[in-house]
Image (cartoon, rainbow, N blue to C red):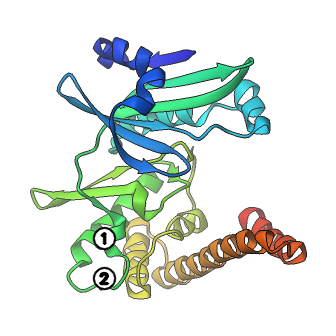
Amino acid sequence: MKIVLNPTFAFLKDFIVTLPEAFTQSGEIIYKGRNEIRVYQVNDLQLNVKRYKKPILFNRIVYSFFRPTKAERAYQNALRVLEKGFETPTPVAYIEKTDGGLFSDGYFVSLQCPYPYTFRKFGGEEQLAGNEAVLAQFARYTARLHANHILHLDYSPGNILFDTIGGVVRFSLLDINRMQFCDVDEDMGCRSFERLSVSEEMFRFMAAEYAKARGFDAEKCIEKVLNYHRESEVYFSNKATIKKKLKEKDYLTCLRLGIDNLRWLYFS
């Protein structure tokens, strides 16, 4: 078992070492799906522990020999994001377990973020009116991320926490194992909004604010943001249809939609 512990939290060593065995027997479950997240109270600290789903055999080989695990990437990316002056839950440790010589299970431990809101707040029937200040600050925040070469590849509503403190909106990024540190051009920047679930009016408002902050043409940014979002919706609709058609053994439809999705992922 590999354990990397942030030196700042060396006093948590005993907890971290026993965590894999104790995980299913303790802590408060706050999310259970493909992965599982539990919160623990340890030494006056609230710790967030994410256990990643055990990967398929091919990915176990990849993570064992060719690519850092999700747990390691979450830990290392958090250090880099904090170093650049942006907020993400402070990384405490990551753990990698092996089975039969291959990676099997990964855990990422961080401090629990206290911010009460996610970007889901702006979904559903929520309107732009009354939310302009937060959305404008979010657009400018996104522009600062990109100007500092930070590109979150899973910039979805549940991965953006925020709160208003002293009249200033503070944002914190979650689930950052999928992230690039690179030059972010106009297309990449506009595409990063694609997974947000807000009204067209909100998209137009944020795209204009983002363009202003980065010195881009506002109308072009608005058009790109809206197009990328529409394409993203088609992609996820196709995924849902593929899942349904697999059960119906309609493999031709699955192949057609799968090719469309691959084309969008890698060639759009």
Q: Is residue 263 left or right of residue 24?
A: right
Q: Which residue corresponds to the image point at 42% horizontal and 24% vertical from the top-left?
A: 22
Q: CA distance from mark 2 to mark 1?
A: 8 Å
Question: How many C-alpha atoms fall within 10 Å of the one at disc 2: few (<14), some, or many (≥20)?
Answer: some
Q: Is residue 79 left or right of residue 223?
A: left
Residue 56, by quadrant, is top right
- Circles 2 and 1 in contact, beta carbons < 8 Å: yes
Q: Amino acid at mark 1?
A: Lys
Q: Which residue corresponds to the image point at 75% horizontal and 71% vertical from the top-left?
A: 242
Q: Which mark is residue 121?
A: 1
Q: Is residue 251 left or right of residue 17?
A: right
Q: From where the camera sits, is residue 87 visible? A: yes
Q: From where the camera sits, is residue 90 visible? A: no
Image quarter hosting the C terminus:
bottom right
Q: Which residue corresponds to the image point at 60% horizontal and 68% vertical from the top-left?
A: 187
Q: Which residue is mark 2?
A: 126
Q: Which residue corresponds to the image point at 65% horizontal and 28% vertical from the top-left?
A: 104
Nearest the eye: 211 or 100 = 100
Q: Which mark is residue 92?
A: none
Q: As drawn, which residue projects farthest toward the front?
A: 25
Q: Which label's residue is closer to the chain start, 2 or 1?
A: 1
Q: Position of residue 197 (x, y in %)?
A: 45, 74
Q: Amino acid at mark 2?
A: Glu
195 up-or-down from 109: above or below:
below
Q: Position of residue 251 (x, y in %)?
A: 88, 72
